[in-house]
Structure formats: C-alpha cells, structure tokens
Image: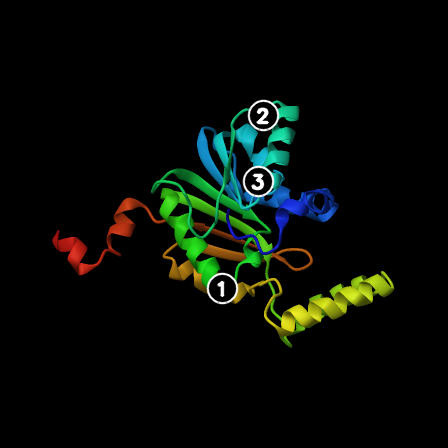
Amino acid sequence: MLDDPYDWNSRVEAWEEVAATDVFLRLRDRVCAEAGSRGGERVLDLGAGTGLVTLALAPRASSVTALDISPAMLDRLERHAASAGVDNVVPVVGDMRMLPFDDESFDLVASNYAFHHLDDEAKELALSEARRVLVPGGRLVVCDMMFSLSLQPRDRRLLMTKLRAIAARGPAGLLRIIRNAGRVAIGNWEHPAPPESWERMVRDRRFEKVRVELLENEAGLVTALRPSVNRGARHRSPLQREE
C-alpha cells in the first residue's frame, strides 16, 4: 500500500466536482493544447485522478498510461473510459517519485494539479523520473499551483482572494481557514512552488527549451523537452565517457 497522506481514496466524489468546474476544464484544454496532437504517441499522465487529462489525450495517442496513488481514483477513471468507449488507457497505481516504467518509455509526460501535493525535494525526484522515462526529444507539460506564501504582489493577491472566497461560506469557511493556518504552521499544508522555483527545478533536471507561463487564478504551466541523444551525451560523466 502506497503512502497517501491526503486519503484520495475517500475523495473521489469531491475531486469529480472540482474537475467538472469551468476553471479546471480550461486548464485541461490548455494542457492538451500544449501537448499537441501527434498521433501514435505513448503518453504518461502523472497524478491522473479520475481521468480529466487522460481521457482528453487518449483519442490522439497510441496509449495513455494513467498513474495515480489512489486505486479508487483509477477505478473511476476506468469506468469513465469504458463509458466513453476509450480502450487505450492503462491505469497504474504508483508514486510519481519512483515510476514503475523502463527508461525512455514515453513520448509525452503530462500532469495537471498533482505536483503541489509534493514538497520541493519530492517534486525534483518526480521531475527526474519524468525525464528518465521520456524518450530523447520527448515533451514535458505540467500545470500546477504556482505561488508561494510571500509578500510578493501576485502572491498576496491570490492569498486574499482565496481567503475571501472561503470566508464567504460562513462559519464553515472560517473554520477551514483556521484549520489551514494550523496546517501551514506545522508544515502539513499543500506545497505549491512559485514560477521561478519551477524553472530552476526543471532546468536542474537538464531539460531544455523550458518555458513557464502564469495562467488564471493561481495556476501556471511548464513546458520543456528532454534533450536529443547527442545533446544529452554531453552531460555524461568523465567515467561514463571512458567506458
């Protein structure tokens, strides 16, 4: 059993409601637009949930492997795929930080609103794994929360907008604010990273053509390529070159 601190198995219905909102549908469409339409590709969706991105990419792909930590999420995804007549989706229960796939297995690795559940060290592990399983020239497309709890104008604006929206729900909203403040204080809150951290982490994993774009609300988009074979060869260690 994989460690699931967020207990996603019990949150399938709640996630389905979020995934059906106009905002998330627009984010899905943007991820798919950035992924492009190149028939016959092998695609990996990290943190696939109930299939928001997986099912949108499936018609244009040879196969889509949907990886998620929650068996219940993937069960729902399979039901959606069956209802839609989609037969090229492969659900896999797994951890983004330790992918159960061979090197150079995928042409595209995509993810939508999953990375902020990992701290920065875990994000770096997951990005390293994404690079490992991509073919040379393969593409990375990640949409996620991109902000920090700082005094920067954008971060302050996003935080105040969220607080006002939650407080408008009355006593239940105020209770949620208090609980979240406690989680932040003990380091048990979600772990969004600001755009500059995303750019550094992706470049440090030796991706190229890295681009970070801020989207609506707190979302941001990262796109990058794994270098081609010749470009990657220049990164080998002296010991590897001697072998």
Image coordinates of residue 71 in percent, x first then y, are 57, 40
- Residue that protrudes farthest toward the bottom in the picture: 151
Q: Are marks 1 and 3 in contact (CB under 8 Å)?
A: no
Task: State the separation of the CA atoms marked 3 and 2.
Answer: 19 Å
Residue 75 visible? yes
With 39 as the anchor, is 31 left or right in this view? Answer: right
Instruction: State the residue position of label 3.
Output: 71
Image coordinates of residue 88 in percent, x first then y, are 51, 27
Secondary structure, mark 1, is helix
Q: Are marks 1 and 2 in contact (CB under 8 Å)?
A: no
Instruction: Say whether disc 1 or disc 3 marks the residue closer to the N-terminus.
Output: 3
Residue at left offset 39%, top offset 49%: 131
Secondary structure, mark 2, is loop
Depth check: give the residue in front, 85 or 203: 85
Residue 164 visible? no
**Which kind of residue does numbered mark 2 sit on?**
Val
**Which kind of residue does numbered mark 1 sit on?**
Asp
How busy is the neighbourhood of tag 3: few (under 14 within 10 Å), some, or many (20 plus)? many
- Which mark is in front, 1 or 3? 3
Task: State the separation of the CA atoms marked 1 and 3.
Answer: 25 Å
Instruction: Say whether disc 1 or disc 2 marks the residue closer to the N-terminus.
Output: 2
With 30 as the anchor, is 97 left or right in this view? Answer: left
Q: Which color scheme did the rendering employ for the protein? A: rainbow
Q: Is residue 143 above or below residue 61?
A: below
Q: Is residue 243 above or below residue 163?
A: above
Image coordinates of residue 11 in percent, x first then y, are 68, 47
Depth check: give the residue in front, 226 or 91: 91
Instruction: State the residue position of label 1.
Output: 120
Query: Quadrant of the rendered structure where residue 54 is?
Result: top right
The label on residue 86 is 2
Image coordinates of residue 124 in percent, x first then y, are 44, 59
The label on residue 100 is none
